[in-house]
Amino acid sequence: MSQRSKEAGSGNHSAAGPGRAAAAGPLAGREDWLLGLLLLAAIIMAYQPAWHAGFIWDDDRYVTENPLLGAPDGLRRIWFSLDSPSQYFPLTYTTFYVEHALWGLKPAGYHWDNIVLHAANALLAWRLLRRLRVSGAWLGAALFALHPVQAQSVAWVAERKNVLMVFFFLLSLLAWTRFIDEPTKRPWRFYALALVFYAFSLSAKTTACTLPAALLLVLWLQKRPIGWRRLAEAAPFVALALGIGLVTVWWERYHLGTHGKLFEIGPVERVLIASRALWFYAGKLLWAANLAFSYPRWTISASAPLAYVWLLGTAALALVIWRLRRWAGRSLEVAALFFAATLGPMLGFIMLSTFQYSFVADHYQYLACLGPLALLAAGLELGWERMTKQSPVLRVIFCAVLLAALGAMTWHQCGMYADAETLWRATIARNPGSWLAHNNLGALLCAKGDTEEAIAQYRQALEIRPEDTETQNNLGVAFFVKGKTEAAIAQYRKILERTPENANALNNLGNALAQKGDMEEAIAQYHSAQQIQPDYAEAHYNLGNAMVKKGEINEALEQYRKAVESKPDYAEALNNLGDALVLKGDFEEAIAQLQRALTIKPDYADAHYDLGNALFEHGRLDGAIAEYRKALEIKADYAEADNNLGTALCTKGELGEGIVCYRQAVGINPRYAEAYANLGDACLRNRQIKQAMDSWQQALAIKPDNADVLNNLAWLLATTSDPALRKGAAAVALAQHANQLRGGSNPMILRTLAAAYAETGSYGVAAVTARRALELAIEQKNDALGATLQKEIELYEAGAPVREAK
């Protein structure tokens, strides 16, 4: 399948096959276009399961819950702050920022961009291998494109950093090959391009720091002298690599926490891990069976003799490659060195945060596998050429079957990345000892409400890794969500017995105690968490919530402000800060804080709802209505928003539409007493007496002690002009209940009770009750009510009941 030309025997020799070489010219001509389109189509079909895949692990940090992507100053902070949720990958986050602006959180666009970048990488690899005169260049690129170990890098949105890094890495290598070609006119343009592309590659992912080794390997492959001049030309690349490498080492250790028992690995063990990892990756290339998202974490000890087998095997293989150099030229050396060098940062010499789960992962060798696969393609090409009877048809069939098999395996492998639950269940099936998969599946199930299975998954994770505090905390959360508050409290106390300064456990213990109603101890736990970690935003937020429940609004405001100081993009804290300001009556600042929350999280339904409440209280009805409607667009089953929208519309005089909203609210939540009460009020204003009475009866069936609803229903039962609806005895009972609830001191309820007595014919009692109501009205300086009561007393003294107009 390689592209050969009349120049094949001239110039420099193969990078991956001895003696013979492929054409070095650019991709051109009909055959090249057809082969390029064929490769592109094969990639798209092999990754078909990723077209409609969702987001999985780490995609939340990178995309779905990354506040930088929606922030107005997000781009500045991506490039010039430490706010990135993982390492310093500014170009990668910039692509996510642009995508977020274009299509929000629809995963298809992110997946398609990964597939397109992978296809571009395959075409660039083809171009590079041809420029290096590698036999079987197209086949090598196709193997790179369709090998199933690549599925993790392409089907996982968070691995955008990998495919993007390799895109610019290959562009930099191509520019370098043009720079070192003697016939190239104005070669320094290509040198500058190589540097620019390299800077982009490093800003996508730091593991591009291995490019200087690849530059020198290109020179070595082409038998060009590597003197001081070439070393000086490579020096800026080395400087860039060292600079970003040091930033990453610092970031990993002090920002991501690569220290502690899990990362205390001696230098000998690190060498042993690296040697075993090299064989692991090579084995997965040769036999891509049982590929998993997360592999078992090896336990390697320098005192175990068997641990040295992989190191001895590596040394033996290096000796074999060196001995074969006379027959194979430099091709074997270059392929092996490229493989080892580009894997170098992920071999365990430098601790990465992901090593707490496993020392190996398929995506680590996304770039590195290009060397061995190109070597394999060149070997196949050479084998075809040396066959006594060459058959072009058989050759095409063989390559087609090989690539179809790899493509089918890739298609199958992509299926496990369809969604997070599929991923974790597939991981457990292939690696039952993955505490990471059990823990994350538990968290996913807990969020879905399947707490029983979540608890079972957490317990399996703890059987594998009993000391893991994250899983222990998650188990407590599952107990809490399931309503097993006592079990949650016991779980958190168990964690704190072993790690008393675990701020997360203290915070969660506070939440469980607050749920139990033990607010004082909950507050004490939040304070303890803050003493250990003063900038613990969640603890400040939860303490603020506790203070609101206690009615201490000023203290709540202080805690919410501290939460926002510690975590400026904490939309939930900003939202609750706005709510607390509404309670204090500071509507202007409340509206500003709620709008700030929505700037950070535009699809935050609760913030739209709460902003609607603030605007309503501030008298801005149109703005309130607009916010309630936005909340309902995001969350169609938001009964509270329907209820408050109905109230705002009725206040504006749009009774018909308000009634529709109230009916929607009770349709969503048939136990929503307040919505039934409001519906009754709206129906009464709309002169729908029967409907008003029915709604209030529904409200009282749910909440029997609502004095206002009791009073309203009693008034209609006593005074309605429709004799079929009047029920004097029922009105008396309801009004008496309302009067007891208000302590006999509410003149409006006493007025209703008087009318109810009159309806039953007890006019004397009605007059006495109405006079008591009149006294209270005068005391309260309610002149309008007093005048009404005077007229009604005259009716009672004349032996007549009160009747509402039709």
Image: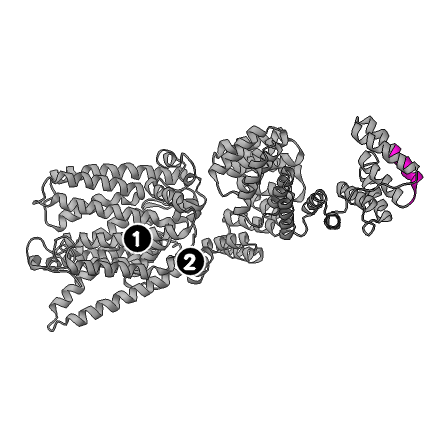
Residue 531, compared with residue 493, is above or below; it is above
* Residue 418, label in figure: 2
**Which residue is denoted by mark 1 in the rendering?**
116
Q: In the picture provided, is 491 more to the left or to the right than 70?
A: right
The colour scheme used to paint the residues is: one colour
The span picked out in magenta is: 761-771
User: Residue 650, how many percent across, how many down?
Assistant: 65, 40
Q: Residue furthest front?
A: 806
Please indicate, yes or no, whether residue 63 appears anywhere in the rendered image. Answer: yes
How many numbered discs?
A: 2
Tag 1 secondary structure:
helix
Q: Residue furthest bottom?
A: 389
Q: Earlier in the sequence, mark 2 or mark 1?
A: 1
**Relative side of 588 to 659, left or right:** left
Asked if the residues shown at circle 2 and circle 1 are in contact, with their CB atoms under 8 angstroms apart, the answer is: no
Q: Position of residue 24 (x, y in %)?
A: 12, 54
> Quarter of the image holding residue 519?
top right
